[in-house]
Amino acid sequence: MRRFPLRRPRPGGSVLASVSRLFLFLLFSGCFGSCIFKPYKEPVGFRYSGAEGERVLYGLSPAAVSGKIPVVPGNAQSSASRYVFEPPLTVPRDYSLELSYTFQEPGPGLAGPRRVALEFPGGGASWELPAGASFLGIQDRPAEIRYAVPVPEGMIGEFSLAVFPAEQGQGAEAASGAFELNALRLIPRWYGFYWDGPVLALTPFVLTPGGAGSALHIDPPAQYRIGLPAELQCRGSARPLTIQTGNLAVEYRVPGTAGDAAQYSLPAGILPAEPYPLILSPAGPFTSVILAPAPQWSFPGEPVPADPGIVLAYPRSAWRDERYEVFRWSAFPQILIFDTRDYAAQDRLFKRLAFFVEKAGYRGRLLRDQEMEGLHGWNAHDYRAEDLGRFFEAARASDFPLLPEERELEDILARNGILRRGPGPSGKGETLPGTGALIAISQQSPAYLRRQFMAHEGFHGIFFIDQDFQDFSRRRWEGLDKGAKRFLLSFFDSQRYDVKDPYLMANEFMAYCLQQPVSQAGAYFGENLAGRINEHSWRRAVLPPMDEDTKTWPDLARTFTQEARAFSEYVNRRWGLTAGMPAMVQARRISEGAAAPRGNR
């Protein structure tokens, strides 16, 4: 057996020299190894933004840095493009991570459609990124997609993007071709979809389970729901729509013909705290559906935008003040709607106004509290900017002691442009009329009267802001049958209206004609009001002959049915409204029974 002799140090060498040579070798080897095995890590080449401040996002491969993920032929999964935040990203409550990306058309070498997935490490959620939205009835191909996936509150250190083969049977919605990530944002959480020019923004958990044309559902799992009060805003073609959430059904009827643009809105107060599933039927066509945290309107200067039908169903538990709530009519934003806890709260806001503006024998006077005691104002109210300006200017000029609630009202009107401040002779500034009007109802009125009062006062509000409506009402009043006019003037006089004011008479004539459906106008005028006049022997002379069999006044019924129909056709032609309710929305609890009988102001 051949042996190799152990090599001894040369006579001229030393141990120190040997150690030095070994150290240099190890140092060289370490540097060379670190150059070879150092992980790839570079700042990404696309935009990142978020409310939490600057965070550097790194890609761990050239493809990740560029945001371009190649799609290769075959059925194998591609390697993931990984990203890391340094320092880790802090995610507040109710936030989503939005990815802006594009899909290029597949090249000739691709075997079939592919899927792109966003994945979080450690068993976190995985989200497939859609290439389109035909599952929502949207056939147009977007130039870019912004997909916002909800992420839990906490920290995100890294995520990855990977390309997978399409599942068997998946075709139209599967991504194919090259994928490119263009931007990344951390945004407040929302659900739905909308177009921003050629860009389509959308989220998960919005789908049509029954296929195209069926109901649209928004139903995220509990861990991804919006924790803040949310509102729903939709746009689409004019058509009837029902929105259901819990036991609440909201039915929309919108003006216009098919193809016209329409907007549908549910404020936060009308929606339950957990509005899921939120179901829109039919599902479209919509150009946008957005469920998002609602704006926090400050009370009392910022009214809640709402349709009168929403106001009637708006729960008191959602009011910002236990005495009253203030709404802005969504279709006529110049009009404010007040809903009060009871008649006492309403009186403290409007009773003095009622006498100053409308009550015969008191018009133009500021009554002291003692003078109004025992007198009835109204159970519902309506006032135009001109009369509100006169009232508050009279109080300012005479230094009249208004109630705190009346001062609150003045401030609300000034904040919303119904009143304005102007230069005055004294240099203190006059109170001048702005533009718009207000109407008011009360929770103390039974439900059937609240609906009728909303119709009566609502059409007053539109009358105040629309000159053509005023002219139409005036012409109908002037052309009214003389016998019917004598009857109505007698009734108005019994209610303490100033019957010498033609503007007021045309306005009230219109509102009484429109406060109930046309089908009920005959009974209301020819039985209800005529019967009340007949109770006073000294007023009976204004009545035409009574039908002895029915104990009604058919001539009045026919005349006022004709007038109600003329007014209803007018408001329908102008705004898509109808006699009985100046609203686009009917909100009802599904367990509610039939409506109660009608009443009057």
Image (cartoon, grey):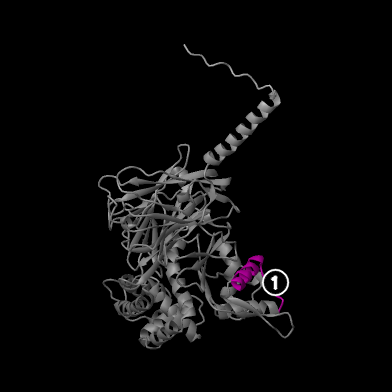
Residue 589 visible in the snapshot: no
Question: Residue type at mark 1?
Answer: Pro
Q: Position of residue 498 (x, y in %)?
A: 52, 81
What range of the chain is rendered magenta? Answer: 398-415
Asked which quadrant contains residue 143, the reply is bottom left
- The correct choice, above or below, for 63 with respect to 403 in the image is above
Could you tell me residue 429's position as x and y percent? 70, 80
The number of callouts visible is 1
Q: Nearer the viewer, residue 300 or 52?
A: 52
**Along the horizontal axis of the image, is 250 left or right of 258?**
right
**Quadrant hosting residue 256:** bottom left
- State the residue in front, 187 or 379: 187
Say if residue 476 shows up in the picture.
Answer: yes
Disc 1 marks which residue?
A: 401
Residue 594, horizontal then vertical, whole percent: 34, 57
Q: Residue at x 29, y 53 (%)?
A: 109
Residue 596 quadrant: bottom left
Residue at the front extreme of this rendering: 11
- In this rendering, is residue 495 above or below 81? below
